[in-house]
Image (cartoon, helix red, strand yellow):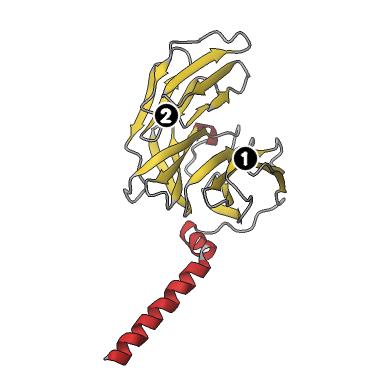
Amino acid sequence: CIAIDALGKLVAGGSTDGTLAVVQYPSLRQVFPYVEAAGEVNDVDFNASGKWLAVATDSELRVVSTKDGSLVQNINGPHTASGQPAMFRFAKFGAGNKSKLKSGTELKNVLYTVLNTKSRKSAYIAMWDTKKWSRIATRPVCQSAITTFALSPSGKLLAVATASLQIAICDAHTLKVLMRIPAAHSFAITALAFDRDDKYLISGSADETCQVLKLPETWPNAFDGIADLVMANLQAVLIAIVLLIAILVALLVRG
């Protein structure tokens, strides 16, 4: 994985063997010695000022200084709000000059992390306050692992792609799902990106296709996370209810 800072002066790269490197651009001169992460590096991202770099591995979220590689913050033992064990898959710093959460926290001081449960049957997005290093919120997004994650340039929208080939777009302030696109591709979705004006979402897939989705100018009311998951899987819910009724009828007949 690779990231470039906002000024285009630094490039960070993380490898499958857990090695992290930060170099100057265009000279490619190493800024500080290699840093060894806790495992395969899943994602790297610079904050708005370019002074910090987030590094995500399955078991650890590490934030280091881009000046000398020194540790700023370390978060171990990823888990959901209910305590379910999970893995860090992505980490992205918030964007937007003046946009704030209801709590007053500026989006540029927020760090978003994607959490895939170890069962890979559900995934969550968590928000962290990088001033206090406290978790602001965690919301369920889908019922399969998240494979790709993107943040819009304005900082207002998040997009994820899942192992079930679904794309979901979320409100970056609340983490609520605004839109779902089922069966967006026929094979693994490997890339997501917003255009500079938040008008389009581009997706790329291992099925050798690229799609451009025009985003609505206004968004409908966001679903509550749990209700949205139920609606997205309504067929499975109905089948479960029918089976339950059938079992109850069978028990009554036998009685």
Q: Which amino acid does label 1 sit on?
A: Leu
Residue 85, picture quadrant = top left
The residue nearer to you, when weighing 156 against 68, is 68
Furthest toward the left, the residue is: 255
Q: How many marks?
A: 2
- Say left or right for 214 vs 59: right
Q: Which mark is residue 176?
A: none
Mark closer to the chain start, 1 or 2: 2
Residue position marked by numbered label 2 in the rendering: 40
Helix, strand or loop under label 2: loop
Q: Quick check: 9 above or below 56? A: above
Q: Label 2 crowding class (10 Å Cα cut-off): few <14, some 14-19, many 20+? A: some
Residue 182, picture quadrant = bottom right
The residue nearer to you, when weighing 212 against 196, is 212
Label 1 – label 2 distance at C-alpha: 21 Å
Q: Position of residue 5 (x, y in %)?
A: 58, 22
Q: What residue type is labelled 2?
A: Glu
Viewport quadrant of the C terminus? bottom left
Q: Position of residue 89 (x, y in %)?
A: 45, 38
Q: Which mark is residue 192?
A: 1
